[in-house]
Image: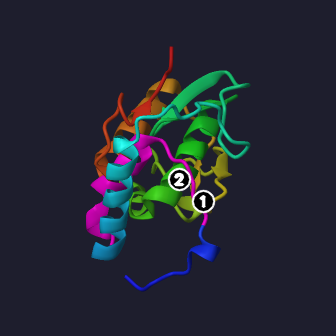
Amino acid sequence: MNHVSMTNAVLVSLPMPFVEAILAARSALDNDAAAALQKSLETARKLDRYVSDQPSHLTPVPARGKYAVEFLGVRFAADTLAGVFCRIVDMMAEVAPEALVSLSEIRTRGRRLVAMNPCHIHPYSPHLPVLQTDAGWWISKNISQDQLVLALRKTCEVSRLTFGNDIKFPLR
């Protein structure tokens, strides 16, 4: 790893499960980045001090929304089931974009879970509504709770996460 001046560095607090998920995906990282993350995690675990659970203004909070979800320790809420999956897809795009490519290859009986082309979501029912995430992926806007759970389980499967641990839905 090249020496980087700390004057341009920013320290960011991340939930432990988030860092652990990044380390689990370390095979996709170069050795220097993986070693830096591992060292950071070891240092964080050694600290024996209280860290505030107060979220920053950038952290999604389940303040409003019908459906509460937790992704790698970050809780958020959305008003619709499609909104939940949209946020999960955007968060996955940040931590494991290659998992979304794998997820786009999965097709259920009548749809793809995610796609880069909106026509690929409902190939047999093009009249059904779709929604584009901030990361540019398309998802179905017509989704039931069972379909969302299936999509979240498949997301966990392709990214080596655990449904019910790394992605929790629904939250009680």
Proximity of marks 2 and 1: CB atoms separated by less than 8 Å: yes
| Rendered location of residue 141, percent (x, y) | 63, 41
Rendered residue at 34%/48% (across/down):
20
Which of the numbered marks, if any, corresponds to residue 136?
A: none
The amino acid at mark 1 is Pro
Is residue 18 shown in magenta?
yes
Question: Residue at image x 46%, y 47%?
Answer: 111
Instruction: Locate residue 85: give its quadrant.
Output: top right
Q: Residues within 10 Å of mark 1 (few under 14, many from 20)?
A: some
What residue lies at 28% left-to-right and 74% top-to-bottom? 31
In the picture shown, does residue 86 fall above or below 53? below
Q: Label 2: few (<14), some or many (≥20) within 10 Å? A: many
Side of 133 where 5 appears, left or right: left
Is 41 rendered above or below residue 163? below
Tell me if residue 20 is in the magenta stretch: yes
Q: Which residue is mark 1?
A: 118
Secondary structure beneath dot 2 equals loop
Percent x, y of residue 144: 53, 28
